[in-house]
Image (spheres, coloured by chain):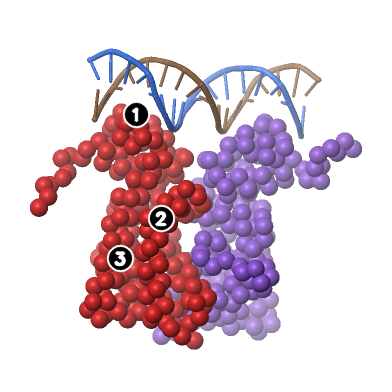
Chain colours: A red, B purple, C blue, D brown
DNA sequence: GTCTATAAAACGATAGAC
DNA sequence: GTCTATCGTTTTATAGAC
């Protein structure tokens, strides 16, 4: 078993944490290394020492969250298939639950904003990085949807997955109107969101 | 008349056009006034002379497109109600057709990327500007959906509209996998997209 | 209205002492 | 690994001639 890692945070970890906050708030161009290192309580030169450049730092900010997120998704998909619970609802659950769970954490919601920025940026090198490292996850889920919806043409299926993805992305990003009410616990709200999403996605995927 | 260069549009309009292109490509912080004025073929000082500041220029870039877009949406909704064609499909058509039509124009697709950036930015002053100037459109369509889906609770309705909005936004932004094929005309592809969206949205809004 | 010239500040990155 | 100091650029914004 691993030792308890957090020795009041290494310089590297503190930079990653501060970078996530500031990239979410001010964007990749908008957040300067000066603001970033000041927020992390480290020296200005530390970013270039530990990461090589600002761009490499951006890449590590993504990797820290997405490695675990997509591992969770594939693990959930795998165990759903093993246990025979691989209806459409279960596959959708495996896809969205880890992401929504992350987006409902304090730090995760910040990261979702970073991710939204990355998509809005249309930055080719960043998109290539995301595609190379995590594209296989989307391909695996797409194959699963194709298996469960065999009556749909390939084109029709892609259309519907695309629109479902839009709805999920929107919900994850927290751009929507829906806010958690005072009398609903955080966990209950997460579960409500997941169930709304799944029912909506099932309707959109299966309609005649 | 001394027209060597494009005198058909004013300095102000040329700046707006160049700003839209560069804000889409490089973001609001990423596009500098130097790049912008060079692309527009005007002097560096012209932005501050005509708009007052870079922020005011951003505001005008939005206003130029959104004023007409939302006027088209409300006009389409009004004429649908007048003619009695106010089924769910017709209301959705009024909401998405003007937006998708805009997003399929050359300059419009650029603007959609600008809009996506604005949402990702989470910039409060910009969001307030959008809400103040165009919030009434969303409220009017929401009221129309409530009228056509009376069996849904307010909360359930908001959830579904929210998810539909996500799907529409995604389709408008052009982030999806679906690309127009060679043998499909631009107009036909637009119509396909609209029909896919409407059918998907109807399923998501009306499912039991 | 448009231009040149420049002020004043912020940026990423790095060299070199410790 | 961390620090100070600074280089070389680039930024927004403005002053003042025409």
Residue assigned mark 1: A44
Quarter occupied by residue B36: top right
Task: Decide if residue A151 is in sight here.
Answer: yes
Residue at 55% in and 76% down: B196
- The reply to the same-chain question for discs 3 and 2 is yes
Residue at 30% in and 38% down: A15
User: Where B61 falls versus B185 (above or below)?
Assistant: above
Which quadrant does the N terminus of chain B fall into?
top right
Looking at the image, which is closer to me, A141 or A169? A141
Task: State the image coordinates of residue A3 (x, y, percent, origin top left).
Answer: 11, 47
Looking at the image, which is closer to me, A194 or B94? A194
Looking at the image, which is closer to me, B67 or A30? A30
Residue assigned mark 3: A73
Quarter occupied by residue A131: bottom left
Task: Decide if residue B190 is in sight here.
Answer: no
Task: State the image coordinates of residue A150 (x, y, percent, origin top left).
Answer: 43, 83
Q: CA distance from mark 3 to mark 1?
A: 37 Å
> In the image as oriented, which residue stretches furthest toward the right?
B1
Which quadrant does the C terminus of chain B fall into?
bottom left
Q: Earlier in the sequence, mark 3 or mark 2?
A: 3
Q: Earlier in the sequence, mark 2 or mark 1?
A: 1
Graded by Cα atoms within 10 Å as few (under 14), some (14 to 19) or many (20 or more), the crowding at tag 2 reads few
| Chain assignment, label 3 | A
Confirm or deny contact between disc 3 and disc 2 (CB under 8 A). Answer: no
| Chain assignment, label 2 | A
Q: CA distance from mark 3 to mark 2?
A: 17 Å
Graded by Cα atoms within 10 Å as few (under 14), some (14 to 19) or many (20 or more), the crowding at tag 1 reads some
Per the image, label 2 sits on a secondary structure element best described as helix
Residue assigned mark 2: A132
């Amino acid at each position: 078993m691993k030792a308890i890692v957090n020795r009041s945070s290494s310089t590297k970890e503190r930079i990653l944490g501060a970078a996530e906050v500031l990239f979410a708030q001010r964007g990749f161009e908008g957040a300067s290394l000066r603001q970033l290192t000041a927020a992390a309580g480290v020296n200005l030169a530390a970013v270039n020492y530990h990461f090589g450049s600002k761009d490499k730092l951006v890449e590590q900010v993504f990797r820290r969250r997405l490695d675990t997120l997509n591992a969770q998704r594939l693990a959930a998909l795998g165990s759903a298939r093993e246990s025979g619970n691989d209806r459409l609802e279960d596959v959708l659950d495996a896809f969205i639950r880890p992401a929504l769970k992350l987006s409902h954490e304090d730090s995760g919601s910040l990261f979702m904003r970073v991710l939204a920025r990355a998509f809005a940026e249309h930055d080719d090198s960043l998109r290539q990085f995301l595609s190379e490292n995590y594209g296989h996850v989307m391909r695996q889920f797409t194959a699963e949807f194709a298996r469960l919806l065999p009556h749909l043409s390939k084109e029709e299926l892609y259309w519907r997955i695309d629109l479902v993805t839009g709805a999920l992305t929107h919900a994850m990003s927290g751009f929507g109107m829906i806010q958690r009410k005072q009398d609903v616990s955080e966990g209950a709200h997460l579960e409500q969101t997941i169930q709304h999403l799944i029912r909506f996605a099932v309707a959109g995927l299966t309609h005649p």
